[in-house]
Image (cartoon, rainbow, N blue to C red):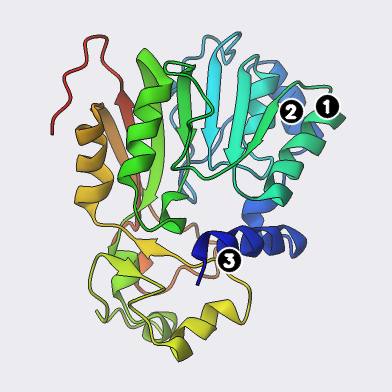
Amino acid sequence: MDYVEYNRKAWNHQVAIRNRWTIPVTPQQIEEARGGIWSVLLTPAKPVPMGWFPAKGGRMDGVKILNLASGGGQQTPIFAAAGALVTVHDFSESQLEQDRSTADSAGLDIRTECGDMRDLSRYPEGSFDFIFHPCSNTFVPEIQPVWDEAFRVLRPGGEMIAGFVNPILYSVDPDLDAKGIAQLKYAIPYSDLTSLTEEDRRRYTDKNEPLCFGHSLEQQIAGQLRAGFHLIDLYEDRWGDDFEASGALNALIPCFMATRAIKPISSQVCR
């Protein structure tokens, strides 16, 4: 299976059925952001601390931001309204259209780029001051290229904030989890392509849902360090109470993490 092409079409389909991660912000939220009042999510429920952003009084005038695999109109218009110069890079044309149409309606200037999150070769080294990368590396099988490329295109002293999935989410039996029983079934790292039988995989493909990859914590945290980043903060999160997918595991352990990392002025990469 060409999983990239499959996931691209799957996310286009998610826009068509109005998946909650494809619904753009409202005009009111954009107007509030112009005045410096806003919040966004890296993980399902907990707003990112404002101290994680290069913002003064809620404004990010002139800050060059890369929203990496972050289409859908939920963050890009907010950052642009707060004065940032925003590029959103995503492989779903429909997700990018959500950003573009929302920005156009509000008179905001943004840049949309269609492409794989692992290949940022179109951007010169040090192009951005800040990278916003929500829980999306779960849709590609290898993530070290994501960290390496993000490090390259970030200027020295710039920061990246990233959300990702605790791989324990993929280790439990999903049918039992929905019934209130958290029972381990799959090994980590996990892949919808190789960990499941074809019959089990149809649970997702028959509904045109994206295929997922459960990366280890070493790949997701140490991978950033190996790229050259210095981690300076971290928090955990759970599915919100309004999420149908919460399941039994959500009551036992936070299944999501967010990290804040800086590209040091003098880079000494740990390899």
Give me the C-alpha separation between circle 1 and circle 2: 8 Å
Element at label 1: loop
The x and y percentages for residue 251 are 35, 66
Q: Nearer the viewer, residue 32 or 233?
A: 233
Q: Which of disc 3 and disc 2 is earlier in sequence?
A: 3
Q: Are marks 2 and 3 in contact (CB under 8 Å)?
A: no
Q: Nearer the viewer, residue 193 or 259?
A: 193
Element at label 3: helix
Q: Which residue is mark 1?
A: 106
| Residue at 33 percent of width and 83 percent of height | 181
Give me the C-alpha separation between circle 2 and circle 3: 32 Å
Figure check: 149 above or below 201: above
Please identify, in this view, whether the residue under mark 1 or under mark 2 is nearer the observer. Answer: 1
Q: Which residue is mark 2?
A: 30
The x and y percentages for residue 180 are 38, 82
Disc 3 marks which amino acid?
Tyr
Q: Nearer the viewer, residue 139 or 257?
A: 139
Indicate the quadrant where residue 265 lies.
top left
Figure check: 247 above or below 201: above
Q: Which residue is mark 3?
A: 6
Outermost residue, bottom direction?
Answer: 199
Q: Are marks 1 and 2 in contact (CB under 8 Å)?
A: yes
Is residue 252 visible in the rendered structure shown here?
Answer: no
Figure check: 196 above or below 1: below
Left or right for 250, reference 229: right
| Residue at 61 percent of width and 27 percent of height | 87
Outermost residue, left direction?
Answer: 271
Disc 2 marks which amino acid?
Ile
Element at label 2: helix
Q: Which of disc 3 and disc 1 is earlier in sequence?
A: 3
Disc 1 marks which amino acid?
Ala
Please identify, in this view, whether the residue under mark 1 or under mark 3 is nearer the observer. Answer: 3
